Image (tube, rainbow, N blue to C red):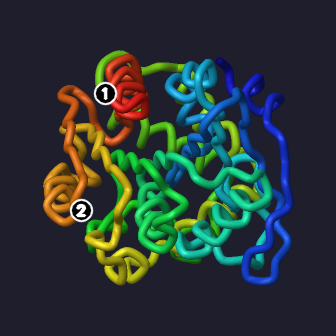
């Protein structure tokens, strides 16, 4: 599925985050038990294009763009930290009547999932974390630099696109998926988007995961990890597996940080097995 088609299929809701009414764009297909997918930085809900839609045969699949990302609100003046994204998710869950649900999170979205599952044990039945930020594993230098005002002061849209394209091409395994890369770049195509991504980057706050005790998570948990990740090493998944009572770790070889793009079939099959209770 191309990004334009994905975007055309999105719906919108208004969610209040810290007294700001923010528009949230989200993919919503299927019936049955809800499964919510949450992306990270610098991606959007399109990250899930190969693994989420097939589940809509048996589940209700919801994949929002976090605020500050994708087709959700990008204007300046609101918090984009994972604490704020957790508030957004809480509001969207209430708006759409999704509780209880299964939560699948990648990168920063995994950090959102950690917080949401720890704070709402009755709401999250199943938790899937993929190459997720946790403990003090983040932020990485590239994201820290992007959040500096001096970095974006002279950055054009073309500069940002070139930087992001290099990031994806250098870290994907195998032959690059041009449709995936194009979709990852598509939201960051305006001056507003350049500022928004910088605000997203500066909103990365290690305290928002170090304050969470993973042992508070009671959800059945799968740590579905790209084993060759240079950003969020699998050693952090091993630590989570030790700290969460009902957790299983599955490392996928030949997959980096973008595990669902590197090995979509293996990722999708293992995710479905877990959600089906196998």
Image quarter of the N terminus = top right
The image shows residue 125 at horizontal and vertical percentages of: 46, 51
Q: Nearer the viewer, residue 183 or 51?
A: 51
- Give the quadrant of residue 206: bottom left
Is 205 located above or below residue 44 in the figure? below
Does residue 271 appear left or right of residue 6 in this picture? left
- The residue sitting at 69% across, 47% down in the picture is 70
Q: Nearer the viewer, residue 255 or 26?
A: 26
- The residue sitting at 61% across, 74% down in the picture is 84
Disc 2: which residue: 244
Is 222 located above or below residue 68 in the figure? above
The image shows residue 112 at horizontal and vertical percentages of: 49, 63
Does residue 240 appear left or right of residue 115 in this picture? left
The image shows residue 88 at horizontal and vertical percentages of: 68, 66
Disc 1: which residue: 278
- The residue sitting at 42% across, 70% down in the picture is 118
Q: Secondary structure under badge 1?
A: loop
């Amino acid at each position: 599925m191309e990004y334009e088609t994905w975007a055309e299929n999105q719906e919108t809701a208004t969610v209040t985050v810290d007294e700001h009414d923010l528009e949230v764009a989200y993919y919503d297909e299927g019936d049955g038990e809800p499964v919510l997918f949450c992306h990270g930085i610098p991606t959007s809900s399109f990250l899930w294009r190969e693994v989420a839609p097939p589940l809509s045969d048996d589940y209700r699949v919801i994949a929002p763009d976090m605020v500050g990302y994708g087709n959700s609100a990008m204007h300046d003046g609101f918090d984009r930290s994972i604490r704020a994204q957790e508030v957004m998710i809480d509001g969207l869950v209430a708006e759409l009547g999704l509780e209880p649900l299964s939560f699948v999170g990648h990168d920063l979205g995994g950090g959102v999932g950690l917080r949401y599952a720890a704070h709402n044990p009755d709401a999250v039945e199943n938790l899937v974390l993929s190459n997720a930020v946790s403990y003090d594993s983040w932020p990485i230098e590239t994201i820290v630099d992007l959040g500096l005002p001096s970095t974006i002061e002279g950055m054009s849209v073309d500069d940002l696109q070139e930087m992001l394209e290099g990031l994806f091409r250098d870290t994907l395994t195998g032959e690059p998926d041009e449709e995936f890369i194009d979709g990852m770049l598509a939201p960051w195509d305006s001056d507003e988007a350049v500022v928004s991504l910088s605000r997203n980057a500066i909103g990365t706050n290690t305290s928002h995961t170090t304050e969470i005790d993973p042992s508070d998570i009671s959800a059945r948990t799968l740590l579905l990890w790209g084993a060759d990740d240079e950003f969020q090493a699998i050693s952090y998944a091993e630590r989570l597996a030790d700290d969460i009572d009902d957790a299983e770790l599955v490392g996928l070889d030949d997959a980096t940080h973008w595990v669902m793009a590197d090995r979509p079939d293996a990722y999708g099959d293992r995710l479905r097995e877990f959600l089906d209770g196998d």
